[in-house]
Amino acid sequence: MGHNGNSYYIGIDLNDSYAMVSYFQQNMKEPETVSTVAGSEEFQIPLVLARRKSIGKWYYGDEARRLSKSGEMVCIDQLLKRALNSEKIVIDDDSFMAEELLALFLKKVMELPSKLGNHSSFDKLVICVDRLTKENVSMFYGMVVRLGINSRQLTVIDRKESFYYFALNQDKSLWLHDVVMFMQENESIFFYSLKRDLRTIPQVVSIDESISYTLDKNDKDKSFLEIINESFKNQIISTVFLVGDTFAEGWMKQSVALLCKGRRVFMGNNLFTKGACYAAATRDKEAEWPFVYMGENEMKFNLSLKVHDKGELSFYN
C-alpha cells in the first residue's frame, strides 16, 4: 500500500479526556483536523460514550455528553483508563469490556473524515498517546480486528515522537536550529526541546523534556517569562510551538515579545494529531527521510546498537 499520490492516512491524538482526528494525503499541503461540528475549530472530541437505556444505539463525544443530561442515557467516560484497567461495564442487562467500548469510540472517530467526503479506507492509522507502555501498545494492537484494520496499518507513538514528525515536516527554515514546544496540561507546563546531530547520517534527533513548571495564576505573563528564560538557556532556537488552551487566553504580553525575538512562534492544540498523520506518511516513504529519532521507546521496543566505526556513528538493529 501507499507510495502513490493517493496514499491516505489518519492520525488520532488520544488522552483520557478527548480525542482529536486528522487526515492526510500525499497531495495535501498539510494534514486537516476534523471537527464533529461542520466548520467549527472545536477539535477536541470528548472521550465519552452514551447509550439510551432501552435501545442499543450508541452516541459519542459532545452529543453523548449532551444527551446524558436527559436522564434516559447511560454515560461512560474515562474509557482509556478503564480499558487499560480491563474494567467490565454493565448497562441494564448487558456487560461490556471497556476495551470494546474504547474501540467503538475510536471507530466512530476514524469515520469522521469519510463523512466529509474523503476515502472510507486508509493506508495507515497512527494513534498518539501521552506515553507508550507495553500495556497500552498491546491493548491497541489487540483492537485491530474491532477497528476493521490489520496490524500493519496501525502504529502507536507518544507525544514526543509526534512532535518530532510534526516539526521536521515543516519548512526547513523552521528547523534550522533547535525547535521547542511548551505544552500546557492542567496546571502544568512541559517544555520539549528537539535537537539534531548534524555530524551523523542520517541525522540523529533527540528530544529533551524538562521537568514540569507551574504557572502562577496571579501573574501568568511574568511567570511564563521566567519559565522561558529558564528553558532557553544556552540554546539557539528557530521555532516555538505553544500547545494548550491557556496560551489562547490573551494574557501573553511580555512573554510573547520575548518568544518572538528572532524566532517563529505558532499556537494551536492539534499539533499531536497532525504529527500522527505526518508519522504515517513519513514511515510510508521512510527511504527518503534523512533523520533517525532516538527516544526512550526506541530503546525499549526496538533494540538499536550504536557503533562507532572509523569515527562514524552507525546504527545496527
Image: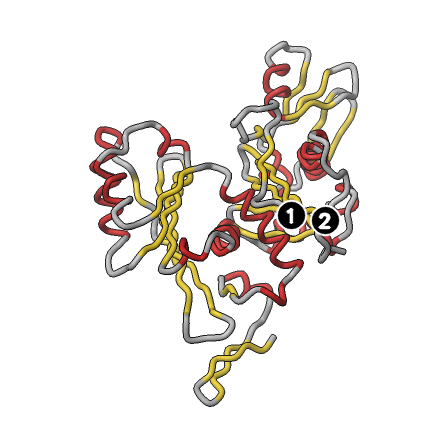
**Left or right: where 126 falls relative to 117:** left
Q: Residue at x 59, y 64 (%)?
A: 301
Q: Residue at x 21, y 44 (%)?
A: 226
Q: Residue at x 64, y 48 (%)?
A: 27
Q: What amino acid is found at the position of numbered circle 1 in the picture?
A: Asn
> Which label was assigned to residue 19?
none
Label 2 sits on residue: 6
First in residue order: circle 1 vs circle 2: 2
Which secondary structure, mark 2? Answer: loop
In which quadrant of the rendered image does the N terminus lie?
A: bottom right
Q: Is residue 219 above or below residue 266?
A: above
Q: Position of residue 195 (x, y in %)?
A: 39, 62
Q: Position of residue 236 (x, y in %)?
A: 29, 59
Contact (Cβ within 8 Å) of mark 1 with mark 2 = yes
Q: Residue at x 59, y 20 (%)?
A: 65
> Which label was assigned to residue 27?
1
